[in-house]
Amino acid sequence: MPPRTPLVLATALLLLAGCEGVTLQPSGPTPKPTTDAATSRKQLDALTVARAGTMAKYSRDKFPHWRTTGDNCDVRDSVLKRDGKNVKTSGCNVVAGTWTSFYDGKVLNSPTKVDIDHVVPLANAWRSGAAKWTTAKREEFANDLDDPQLIAVSAGSNRAKGDQDPSTWKPTQSSSWCEYAQDWIAVKTRWKLTVTTKEKAALDDMLETC
């Protein structure tokens, strides 16, 4: 998979995308944590290990998304533009392009076939600390374009993943395991979320593929 586009460059591309009929050709998919495997291991070791919390009172509505990013865009539009190739827009709506799903390698030729996945699922975040957050903080998490938390993937892989952590679900494309583990660790580090014992062990194993 090609190197991921830095946020500043991605933002510049989005600003240029406001005109109808614009075709975008970003140089890479999603923000990538500027870490190597050794740094990711240190981050993983620093995460608090705890049992998964309860799902009581959980609702996706407590993580408001997708919020506006200006000019009739929302966060979904922004990720589609950032992660796709030859992306075409009508106004701010993405109407065409090509996306390669990071999880299973499928090439998607329509935005309707693309899901925007939260690398650390909202329900997993709830169980690992977000239940104690304010709704405003959960909204920041659900719309996080600064960290490797949002990614364009195939609908099938997104449904298969659900709210599972790496101990029970991994991308079917094993070449993605290293980067997926790094992304997961980066997000949990940034948001100070906990990991379970099994989750930590699975992440450690995935880093072996780096």
Image (cartoon, rainbow, N blue to C red):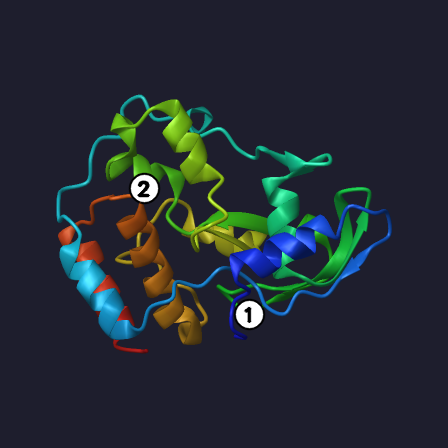
Residue at 55% over, 70% down: 105
- Relative side of 101 to 42, left or right: right
What residue is pinned by disc 2? 124
Q: Quadrant of the C terminus?
A: bottom left
Residue at 52% over, 75% down: 1
- Relative side of 42 to 163, left or right: left
Residue at 57% over, 32% down: 67
What residue is pinned by disc 1? 105
Is residue 114 in view?
no
Residue at 56% over, 57% down: 8
Q: Nearer the viewer, residue 121 or 13?
A: 13
Question: Which mark is first along the chain, 1 or 2?
Answer: 1
Q: Count neighbours of disc 1 (C-alpha within 10 A) and say few if under 14, some if 14 to 19, many if 20 or more.
A: some
Q: Amino acid at mark 2?
A: Asn
In the rendered image, residue 10, in percent from the top left (x then y), is placed at 60, 57
Question: How many marks on residues?
Answer: 2
